[in-house]
Image (cartoon, grey):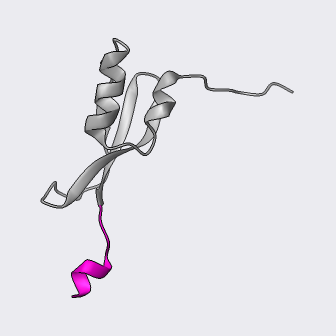
Amino acid sequence: MTERTDFSPLRACLGLPLAQALAFCRARGEEPQIIYTGERAAGEGLTPRVIAVREKELVVSLFRDGDPREEEA
């Protein structure tokens, strides 16, 4: 049986905010393509985060970061 392993250094970007992931990539001399998912429009309080890596692409989705309990107050 053949085991597939992905040793892409871009995998280190998973979960990172996009700005931080791009800084990591650029420090390595790479300029990945950014692919956005979902239909949520970018707005205040939303953070683009890397959710997947495909070869030289970072797949990004927008997340509402922060403590949801703050919104209840």
Q: How many marks?
A: 0
State yes or no: residue 42 in magenta. Answer: no
Q: Is residue 24 visible?
A: yes
Furthest residue to the top? Answer: 29
User: Residue 72, located in which quarter of the rendered image?
Assistant: bottom left
**25 or 54, which lies in front?**
25
Q: Quadrant of the N terminus?
A: top right
User: Residue 28, located in which quarter of the rendered image?
Assistant: top left
> Which residue is pictured at 37% across the width and 39% down the height?
59
Q: Quadrant of the C terminus?
A: bottom left
Horizontal and vertical percent for residue 54?
46, 29
On screen, residue 45 versus residue 6, left or right, reads left
> Which residue is pictured at 34% across the width and 46% down the height?
49
State yes or no: residue 71 in magenta. Answer: yes
On screen, residue 56 versus residue 41, left or right, reads right
> Which residue is pictured at 34% across the width and 33% down the height?
21
Residue 40 to residue 15: above or below: below
Residue 10 to residue 43: above or below: above
Furthest residue to the bottom? Answer: 73
**57 or 10, which lies in front?**
10
Residue 48 to residue 67: above or below: above
Q: Is residue 33 visible?
A: no
On screen, residue 60 versus residue 51, left or right, reads left
> Which residue is pictured at 29% across the width and 32% down the height?
34
Furthest residue to the right? Answer: 1
Horizontal and vertical percent for residue 48?
27, 48
Residue 55 to residue 16: above or below: above
Horizontal and vertical percent for residue 33?
30, 26
Horizontal and vertical percent for residue 71?
23, 80
**62 or 27, which lies in front?**
27
User: Residue 2, located in which quarter of the rendered image?
Assistant: top right
Highlighted magenta segment, given as a residue range: 65-73
